[in-house]
Amino acid sequence: MELKYYKIIVESSPNMIWKSGIDGNCNYFNNTWLEFTGRTIEQELGDGWAEGVHKDDLKNCLKVYLDSFHNRQPFEMEYRLLRADGEYRWINDRGVPFFEEGEFSGYIGSCIDVNEKVEGRHLKFKAQRDGLTEITNREYFEKMFLQEFKKAKKMKSPLSIIMIDIDNFKSVNDTYGHLAGDKVLIALAKTIQKEIRNIDLFGRYGGEEFIIALPEIEGSSAKSIAERLRKKIEKTKISYKKQALRVTASFGAAQLSDEKNPKELLDKSDQAMYLSKGNGKNRVTLFE
């Protein structure tokens, strides 16, 4: 096939196509790319194309590209690119190194608009998260916990749960304001997140209540984990308007036994947590 036909195919492609040389600078963009950005080829050449990348995505975009370029490896990434009408759109960009007569000659890339797909994914993620602490919300936690409950029942494997309630949280809000209360919730969520495993389920269960599901963990171990978390929280300093706030939390732990549904196990951890509250707070109780 003659070279001119290759050029026609590339220029007419519905995909946005680019090419860079051995110096890493881009030296070609097809018509589809230029129509998308509304810019001239001269504006896009070199690293001019990066001017259209969203400022929040630019650092990672350049890192992926330059790291891949250095290692001569293919890459795939998503970032927001400014369209000609002024709207940022998520695009999927795939680049591969190409060689001429065995010599590295640069990269060729192909991009497609995936905005609806990415935004749909982001909306799904947000629907599963607590808006303040960004951990799992109650609805999604209960959905995932049901799966773990069924699995543990079927496999006859251990499963424990820990309920956590911040002590005297109302007084924090009354004394320092709700913004201080929000900072406390965020700080505790981060503290707990660092201390648990990736396979554990962690969510915000209510106003100042958190909950953790521990697959493959016996009740005695769950109690030890809760005690470690209690001490971490007790030592956590939360900065607010030049003040260092400190809070404590009460814990209730329970292990799966003969419960017929997840709610029964949740209720047991809740009862244990209220026993901790009634016995002086800032302590751990394992449901017996």
Image (tube, rainbow, N blue to C red):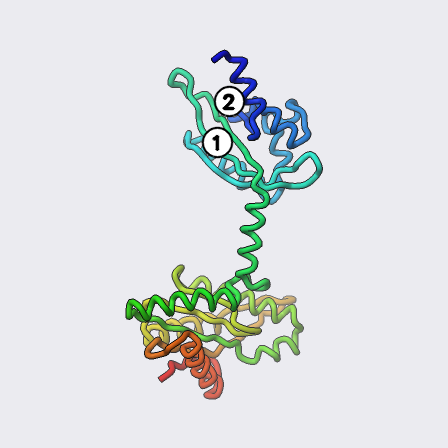
Marker disc for residue 21? 2
Residue at 47% x, 68% y: name it: 142
Please, is residue 47 above or below residue 230 in the view? above
- Whole-percent x, y for residue 239 in the image: 59, 66
The quadrant in which residue 263 appears is: bottom left
Looking at this view, name the residue that lies furthest to the right.
85
Residue at 41% x, 69% y: name it: 213
165 left or right, relative to 224: right
Residue bearing mark 1: 95
Considering the numbered disc 2 on the image, is that residue within a helix, a strand or a loop?
loop
Considering the numbered disc 1 on the image, is that residue within a helix, a strand or a loop?
strand
Please, is residue 203 above or below residue 247 in the view? above
Residue type highlighted by circle 2 = Gly
- Whole-percent x, y for residue 288 in the image: 35, 84
Alpha carbon separation for disc pair 2 and 1: 13 Å
Residue type highlighted by circle 1 = Gly
Looking at this view, name the residue that lies furthest to the bottom.
279
Residue at 36% x, 78% y: name it: 259
- Dot 1 crowding, Cα within 10 Å, few <14, some 14–19, many 20+: many
